Amino acid sequence: MTLLDGKATADAIKEEIAIIVSDIINRGGKRPHLAAILVGEDGASKTYVAHKESSCQKVGFDSTVLRLPSEITQESLLNEIEKINSNPQIDGIIVQLPLPKHIDEQKVIEAIDPAKDVDGFHPVNVGKMVSGLPSFVSATPAGIIELLKRYNIETSGKHCVIIGRSNIVGRPMANLLSQKSNPGDCTVTVCHSRTRDIKKHTLEADIIVAALGMPGFLKGDMVKDGAVVIDVGITRVEADTKSGFRLIGDVDFNEVAPKCSFITPVPGGVGPMTIISLLKNTLKASGN
Ligand code: GUN
């Protein structure tokens, strides 16, 4: 079994991006600039935005975090997005999700200029991605593709089972892995909460992407020998640690890992790769 070390891979890619940024600066160019909007006080969202901000600093990007109160009206939030859309200094925009219940997330996503939509959530980017056209691809699926590529994992002709059908992970992942590309060329099955007998499907999978948000869902008896297992789960559970919590994946690692050819750990697997995709998208949005 080989551990897919997302942390080490992400650190290596950050060094590559930092070199590209110094080249841009040496040629008299402008630093790529990411703006993140954080609404409210959700602990997980604050941590994710802090990681995005520090990753920007590490590679030499400028970053701005706009912190807004949870009571902000939808109209005011849309106004803030419009200001960033028209600010030529800023290349990429993300609005950290989830948003408070009184705000329509889809309206917010659609307010972002598709050319600055480095999360790849705008329907224009989703449509382009599904059509196989150049686009911003959402960060988690793009990070998983990059990890498969860096570890030279053969995907062509393989049966991939994705558990979860979210717009952020499951559905774009299914699209990317079924495209005529490398990584890609998979036969893809998408399982979800209404799927009957998920185990029947996962037992046939060469590659499993678990993205349903249920800690320890995928057990050893659901996986065939030699499978590649990608764990997207990051459920926070209270623990006696410095931060007061621990991240638990959707895969029961102790049971599943011995059966795998490759598996991602949690933490240190998919998570760090997600930020890499955001950095790469921001670089692309800046015209580099
Ligand atoms: N919330 C959970 N994942 C994401 C993500 O990739 N981008 C944003 N903006 N919010 C998220």
Image (tube, helix red, strand yellow):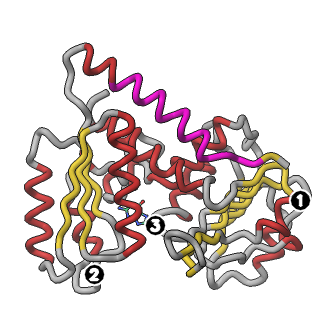
Question: Residue 192, position in %: x, y?
Answer: 63, 77
Residue 72 located left or right of residue 11 = left
Question: Residue 41, position in %: x, y?
Answer: 29, 76
Q: Residue at x 48, y 30 (%)?
A: 15
Circle 3 is placed at which residue position?
167
Dot 1 or dot 3: first in sequence order is 3
Tag 3 secondary structure: loop
Circle 1 is placed at which residue position?
259
Establish whether ligand 1 lies closer than 8 Å to the Cβ of label 3: no
Q: Is residue 135 visible?
A: no
Circle 2 is placed at which residue position?
100
- Front tag of 1 and 3: 1
Q: Which residues are magenta?
A: 3-21
Residues tagged 1 and 2 counted as in contact (Cβ below 8 A) = no
Disc 3 crowd rating (10 Å Cα; few below 14, some 14-19, many 20+) is: few
Which disc is residue 55 wearing?
none
Residue 258 located left or right of residue 185 = right
Q: Quadrant of ligand 1?
A: bottom left
Disc 2 crowd rating (10 Å Cα; few below 14, some 14-19, many 20+) is: some
Question: Residue 76, position in %: x, y?
Answer: 8, 72
In the depicted view, which residue is nearer to us: 218 or 121? Answer: 218
Q: Residue at x 75, y 73 (%)?
A: 218
Tag 2 secondary structure: loop
Q: Is residue 80 visible?
A: yes
Q: CA distance from mark 1 to mark 2?
A: 41 Å
In the depicted view, which residue is nearer to us: 70 or 283? Answer: 70
Residue 260 located left or right of residue 230 = right
Q: Amino acid at mark 2?
A: Pro
Disc 1 crowd rating (10 Å Cα; few below 14, some 14-19, many 20+) is: some
In the depicted view, which residue is nearer to us: 133 or 10? Answer: 10
Image mark count? 3
